[in-house]
Image (cartoon, rainbow, N blue to C red):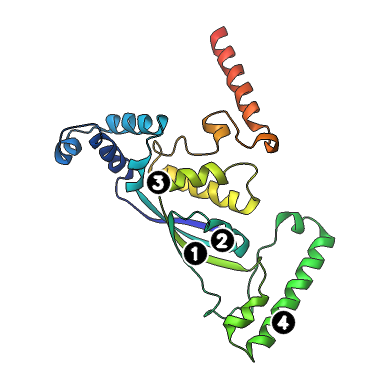
Amino acid sequence: MHVELIAYTPEPERTVAIAGRLCYSARGVDELRDNLSDAEVASQLRNLVSVGHLSPAEHANFTFAIEGVSRALSHQLVRHRIASYSQKSQRYVNEQDFTYITPPSIAANPEAAAVFHAQIARLQEAYRELARVVPREDARYLLPNATETKLVCTFNARSLFNFFRLRCCRRAQWEIRDLAYRMRDQVRQVAPVLFALAGPSCETEEICWEGALSCGRAAEVRRRETRETGEESDE
């Protein structure tokens, strides 16, 4: 998997902070912008996130190039509708030698891997045969979820908060969880304060909304916080 943040709103944190301040100030944008220190930007962002006032975050956009992922992942990714996507077309691109993604559970099991790779090889050959006699847009119906795809996608920061909340969760499917962690790492490099509290609720609120399906991490986080607080108070 290759993920690269290829473009983003200049000074994303300052942009969000100015938008947030404007909501509560009678001053104009020029005055708000000129008198906003880095410390005030950080303070404003922490306040906005802590009270859940995330609409100002919609003014900061982040564009990613994503390669080496499966169609199984992309079908999940595009369910995040407050985003823009451009994806490699299976209608126009010849997939006769398509590359594919092998799940770790299959790669780690020799018997499963042998079955998986043999079936992929059969599908590749069947696609080549079909593509010689029917349009590629019809031959593609044979292509599996494992087929590798490429995308460019753009999210605003508020939509990324939602994406990270759902897809950084331990219960998220392994491939999109890996993608979410890589994307979060990269936006934190350019907007560390804004995305400091971006992630699943077990990390940000020490609570889990999965009910009986919870992995138990929220309780682990609470116990760790309790231990750390106790250790600090003993000192």
Decide: few, some or many residues near mark 2? Use Cα within 10 Å; few <14, some 14-19, many ≥20: many
Which residue is painted at 32% across and 51% down in the image? Answer: 9
Marks 1 and 4, how far apart at CA: 25 Å
Q: CA distance from mark 1 to mark 2?
A: 8 Å
Badge 2 marks a residue whose secondary structure is helix
Give the percent coordinates (x, y) of residue 32. Answer: 19, 36
| Residue at numbered disc 1 | 151
Q: Write down the residue under mark 2.
A: 74
User: What residue is shown with label 4?
Assistant: 125
Q: Three-letter amino acid code at disc 4?
A: Glu
* Quadrant assignment for the N terminus: bottom right
Q: Is residue 191 left or right of residue 203?
A: left
Which residue is located at x 49 percent, y 49 percent?
Answer: 183
Q: Quadrant of residue 21?
A: top left
**Where is mark 3, residue-wise?**
157
| Residue 213 located left or right of residue 38 | right
- Residue most extreme to the front: 211
Distance between the alpha carbons at the discs numbered 3 and 4: 43 Å
Left or right, residue 26 beside residue 78: left
Residue 50 appears in the rendering: yes
Taking the spot 32% from the left edge, 45% from the top edge, the residue there is 12
The amino acid type, in three-letter code, at marker 2 is Ser
Q: Give the crowd class for mark 4: few <14, some 14-19, many >=20 residues within 10 Å.
A: some
Tell me if residue 138 comes above or below residue 46 in the rendering.
below
Query: Which of pointers 1 and 3 lies earlier in the amino acid sequence?
Result: 1
Give whichever of discs 1 and 4 has the lower sequence position: 4
The residues bearing labels 2 and 4 have C-alpha atoms spaced at a distance of 24 Å
The residue carrying pointer 1 sits among few (fewer than 14), some (14 to 19) or many (20 or more) residues within 10 Å by Cα, namely some
Query: Residue 106 is drawn in which quadrant?
Result: bottom right
Q: Are marks 1 and 2 in contact (CB under 8 Å)?
A: yes
Residue furthest right in the image: 111
Between marks 1 and 2 in the image, the one whose residue lies nearer the viewer = 2
